[in-house]
Image (cartoon, rainbow, N blue to C red):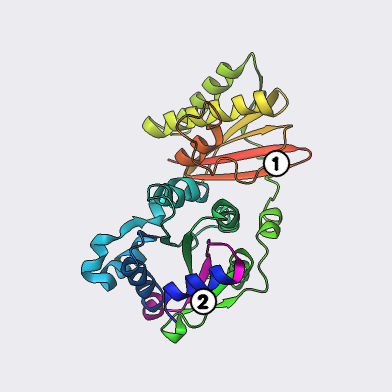
Amino acid sequence: MSADALAVRAEDAAGDPFVHPALFYRDDSEYLAGTVPFVLDGLSAGEPVAVAVPRERLDLVRDGLGDAAAEVKLLDMREAGRNPGRIIPGVLRAFADAQPPGRRVRIIGEPIWAGRSDTEYPACVQHEALINAAFTGRPVTILCPYDLARLDADVVADAYATHPLVVDASTGTMTGERVSDAYDPDGIVARYNRPLPLVPDALAYTFDSETLPDARHTVTAEAQRLGLTGVRLSDLALVTAELTTNSVVHGGGSGTVRVWAQDRYVVCEVRDKGRLADPLAGRRPAPQDQRGGRGLLLVNLVADLVRVHSDDEGTTVRCWFAL
């Protein structure tokens, strides 16, 4: 069965044009067997195709496609998706929304690879779960490769929970597809909504509507002292302004912003008493005619990593900026 037939069969079975399989592979040959036919079937069907995977895998796919690679949008996921919160609005939706309405779109996206840190992983797996809500009802197929030889067993288990279909590339075709009995994206979003412990040595500033400018200046000055400069310093100032303003408007009127150095990053977080009820907040592209409502989206687009925890006690948004 071709990758195109997989998409049709999944749509018929689920009654939803969105198809989201995980592709399990063990080596380069299995990777190519699972990805190249998927791309070529899409091109043959006249579907726009994008491949967003880590650079070493991107080179492998490009070589496997030969001349057909010129017809595909190729993105290095280590750059385009270094912050998982950026992938839905900045990679997947950016490509899908640029295509003619109603045309099926085909994407390979690999946001989880060996080497992703424990700090990054909760944001990665929540992203994979939220893809399902972000694309429900749309004629889009997103194939997500997982390296069985290098990823931990817990990561593979989570892939079964975030993908309604799983495919084994070891057969050399797409005939190994099956429905995942463990599919539970909402459960994954909830399970990885983990508290972010306070960092005791961080500089802290409590703000309200009257002291928003002081909060931004305090954080920027500390980040500069810690070594952040140039565009990244400006990005941190923008993120601080957006998050503190959100706290005043939506989070109870006040909050606390903290900044510190961690490994090779400057980290900034804002805590307030509000609750973030929408897990897709900050992950939807904003319509051009929309006024406001872009704060969390901007945060996701410019930070190197964003982690969020929200419950009845309040919300914490923590952002990393590489030095």
Seen in the image, is 205 located left or right of residue 42?
right
- Which residue is located at x 50 percent, y 62 percent? 112
User: Which numbered dot is residue 277?
Assistant: 1
Instruction: Tell me where residue 92 appears, x and y as whole percent.
Output: 45, 52
- Which residue is located at x 67 percent, y 33 percent? 271
Instruction: Tell me where residue 184 appears, x and y as whole percent.
Output: 68, 63
User: Which numbered dot is residue 167?
Assistant: 2
Is residue 199 on the magenta stretch?
A: no
Front-most of 46 and 151?
Answer: 46
Q: Quadrant of residue 235?
A: top left
Front-most of 137 and 79?
Answer: 137
Is residue 17 on the magenta stretch?
A: yes
Badge 1 amino acid: Ala
Front-most of 89 and 46?
Answer: 46
Q: Which residues are magenta?
A: 13-31
Badge 2 amino acid: Val
Residue extending furthest toward the right: 312
